[in-house]
Image (tube, rainbow, N blue to C red):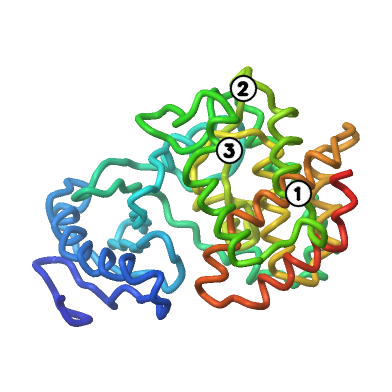
Amino acid sequence: MKSPETVITNITFHNEPKLSEHEVDRNFNERRLALVPLIRDFISANDRFKGREVGVTFAEKGVSSLIAIIETPAEKMVLKIPLSNGFAEGEAQFLGVWEQAGVKVPHVFEAGVLGERSYTLMGYVDAPVLADAYSHDERLEKNIYEEMGQTLHTMHAAPAKGYGRVIESKAEYSKFRDWIFSSDMQTRIKYVKENNLLNDDKHGSIDEAIKILVDFVGDDGKSSYCHDDFGGSNIFATHPMTVFDPNPRFNNGYIDLGRSLMNHISAGGLDEALPRLIKGYFGDTPHDKKVLHASVLLNCCMKLPYKHKTKSLGVIQNMQKYLAENKGLLQ
């Protein structure tokens, strides 16, 4: 790999990709390094950058994707390349749908395949993320949690069909039950049970939560364009807020909202954020509290295996504490 500040024709790499220290991320580290020469070739062959001086800086954050900030004298862009072999297509597709719905997102210039991996080239947003721009108290004072809920509701307004990952612009599964009983989902749930990360009597039954969700969603296949990681680290502090970095999934809106709530629960000490997010999402429309809590429990099961492998004990304890205190919501 080229050393920092090495100029390749008109391209300057200002740093190297930051590598994860966790063994579970070893394959991701290898893929990061292998992508660097492909990024050089991509820039060299792209007419957008022809004849220009180009600087490339790899972002410090980002576990599941390699983020390269590309800068020329005229503009600044972001090249995002997912690292997971099982990562869904569709980021450009989803951002486009949300942009049409009136949600502020980075504008997509192009999308395609780089080597064996998909990429999205989009506009750079010069703003901090919400998590860095405002403290929890400031977010409460400025009604940011309510705005987040409203924004997520708008993102879910466009109708979709099917569930799960995006494959050739369509959903992986036609029915919700096929997604929730898929091998990936069941492998995660099995890991949680075998490692005793959650206990049915203490934290609530995951099998009961699944039944609640399957009965609620039904078999009509109606779904939404879901972010699957909607939180303060994936929203820029602009006015209105700018949503970015989705993990594109077709699903029921309750699942996506439950994922966002789980993100806040895992951070700990943000209990006041949860009712604000829910209020922003549903407004004055009644919602099913049992279904929403079943979604939170399911999303905890989806996240816990990785947190356990990376020894994120604080996050695990935050989830366990919340689920123990609220297990009655499944009744």
Which quadrant of the figure has residue 112? top left
The reply, left or right, for residue 39 in relation to residue 239 is: left
Q: Is residue 142 visible?
A: no
Instruction: Characterize the local packing of mark 3: few (<14), some (14-19) or many (20 or more) Cα atoms within 10 angstroms.
Output: some
Whole-angstrom CA distance, mark 1 to mark 2, is: 25 Å
Which quadrant of the figure has residue 24? bottom left
User: Is residue 43 positioned above or below 217 on the image?
Assistant: below
Which mark is on residue 234? none
Residue in the image at 54% along x and 46% along y:
186
Q: Position of residue 14 (x, y in %)?
A: 27, 77
Instruction: Characterize the local packing of mark 2: few (<14), some (14-19) or many (20 or more) Cα atoms within 10 angstroms.
Output: some
What kind of residue is marked 2? Lys
Whole-angstrom CA distance, mark 3 to mark 1, is: 29 Å
Badge 3 element: helix
**Which is more foreground, mark 3 or mark 1?**
3
Q: Which residue is mark 1?
A: 147
The reply, left or right, for residue 133 in relation to residue 288 is: left
Q: Which residue is mark 2?
A: 222
User: Is residue 105 positioned above or below 60 on the image?
Assistant: above
Q: Position of residue 295 (x, y in %)?
A: 71, 45
What kind of residue is marked 3? Ile
Q: Which residue is mark 3?
A: 180
Residue in the image at 51% along x and 74% along y:
310
What kind of residue is marked 1? Glu
Nearest to N terminus: mark 3 or mark 1: 1
Q: Which residue occupies the extreme left position in the image?
A: 9
**Which is more foreground, mark 1 or mark 2?**
2
In what quadrant of the picture does the N terminus appear?
Answer: bottom left
User: Is residue 173 positioned above or below 153 on the image?
Assistant: above
